[in-house]
Amino acid sequence: MNYITVRGVAIGLGIPKICVPVTEASGGDIVKQAGAAAPKADLIEWRADAFEDVFSKASVNHVLKELRTAVGQRPLLFTFRTEAEGGAKIDVDDYIALGEAAVESGCVDLIDVEMDRGEKAVLRLIDKAHERGVFVVGSYHDFSKTPSEEEMFSRLETAAKGGADILKLAVMPEDMNDVLRLLSVTYKASGVFEKPLITMSMGAMGSISRVCGEYFGSAVTFGQSGAASAPGQFKAASLYHALGFLHRQASEIGPDTKLAGGHIFLTGFMGTGKTSVAYALSKKTGLPVIEMDETIVRREGRSIPEIFEKDGEKYFRRVETDLLREISGDRKETFIVSCGGGAVLSEENVGMMKKKGRVILLTADPETVFSRIGGDTGRPNLKNRNTVEDMAALMAQREAKYRAAADHIIETDHKDMDQIASEILQVLSGQEALC
Ligand SMILES: Nc1ncnc2c1ncn2[C@@H]1O[C@H](COP(=O)(O)OP(=O)(O)O)[C@@H](O)[C@H]1O
Ligand SMILES: O=C(O)C1=C[C@@H](OP(=O)(O)O)[C@@H](O)[C@H](O)C1
Ligand SMILES: [Mg+2]
């Protein structure tokens, strides 16, 4: 698996996620900047090295609490960037203590850990973060040059071996060949490490690396809403449009595939793997993916839990049907459509899917689903469904509709994504009987 889900944001799948750094100096301004940035950001990063009172634990904790409220359901990343890597002066003990305090505050979802800050201390901080359920971005920055490909690769490897959940590399190019080398390492590493990457070539020369992550394997890109936190950053709003444009271009090029029969709609209960399998299938076929939930989140500028909370499930279902109508319009291309788990509950939706393609139902036992997504906060229909029995009950309630809509059924228990994708291709090319 080369993606992780943080508060419902799949880091490593589909369009790169936009992380907006908060760079203000005073507590009040920090919270204001974070609140203003939230709508266009998938993640918010607090650059604590810019905070004027960062050496007071009480002040840091106070700001963290307020930030948690200001960013709502957005994942919050805590970063103290040291002077050696483009930030502020701090000694190693203070760096680790500050990181530990952030992790213990219960307010952050991710922490940036510079892998160069001393092996033992860094590994301790990573362990502590994991004990508290906080994801670790293991980072390395070089503001003066682009190291050799071997060195860049080995930096990522050190972060992976150290237990980081996301591997980050930011380097400075001296010419376009350096940019190419960074992209090349990114592409190679994305096929080797089973963890999402964040890489960038900084400065104006490296700008291209900040928008092409979907193609080369960088999962997150940093966009400014106030001051840039590193050279070459785009404004978050421009990034949002650029990423959408490049993503759409991929869809508009049109597939080169022998598959006939229209779009491939992946349906099934939450956690059966629709989203993951869609991307695995895309790798095999070259067909573009439309991830319905992700598309809705982008357009609405808020997470699914936020949509449910503010406007209710009915509203979400309307938006879902509108999107399906768009997908099912007159288009030359074939898409792999990763549906939300409730999409087939509406007859109108099923009608559109059947008319425009094949419906593949993914199934899994309640125990399997629970082991995959139990405790996930990104799926509002799982709220207060805390046991296998709760999930089984909702699954049973929906079962008939899932099956009635399906052209083919694929069981996913004890199979990996690659195997599931291959089975889908088999049934679609008629090597298996229709169910
Ligand atoms: N076949 C599988 N084997 C192991 N883990 C899986 C499998 N399919 C999905 N998962 C994991 O389950 C979680 C939910 O998968 P996801 O693709 O988001 O499902 P859905 O879109 O159907 O809700 C993810 O953490 C994913 O990595
Ligand atoms: O089953 C459902 O009611 C839902 C499933 C989710 O999609 P996934 O199945 O991909 O989690 C998402 O559309 C929304 O939270 C509602
Ligand atoms: Mg999904």
Image (tube, rainbow, N blue to C red):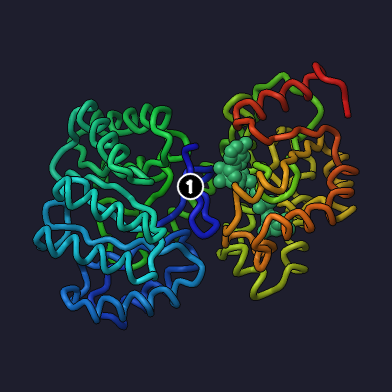
Q: Which of the pair 388/428 is nearer the observer?
A: 388
Q: Is residue 380 rendered to the left or right of residue 112?
A: right
Q: Residues within 10 Å of mark 1 (few under 14, many from 20)?
A: some
> Where is ligand 2, by quadrant?
bottom right
Q: Quadrant of residue 385?
A: bottom right
- Check disc 1 and report its element: helix, strand or loop: strand
Position of residue 204 relative to residue 409, above or below, is below
Instruction: Give coordinates of residue 14: x percent, y percent.
Output: 54, 43
Q: Mark 1 vs ligand 1: CB under 8 Å?
A: yes
Amino acid beneath label 1:
Ile
Instruction: Give coordinates of residue 394: x percent, y percent.
Output: 78, 58
Which residue is rendered at x = 79% and y = 44% of the image? 328
Q: Which of the pair 190/257 is nearer the observer?
A: 190
Position of residue 324 relative to residue 227, above or below, is above
Position of residue 344 relative to residue 209, above or below, is below
Position of residue 30 relative to residue 259, above or below, is below
Q: Residue furthest top?
A: 431
Identify the residue position indicated by label 1 in the image. 4
Instruction: Give coordinates of residue 145: x percent, y percent.
Output: 15, 38
Which residue is rendered at x = 41% and y = 58% of the image? 133
Residue 76 in view: yes
Instruction: Give coordinates of residue 334: x percent, y percent.
Output: 72, 33
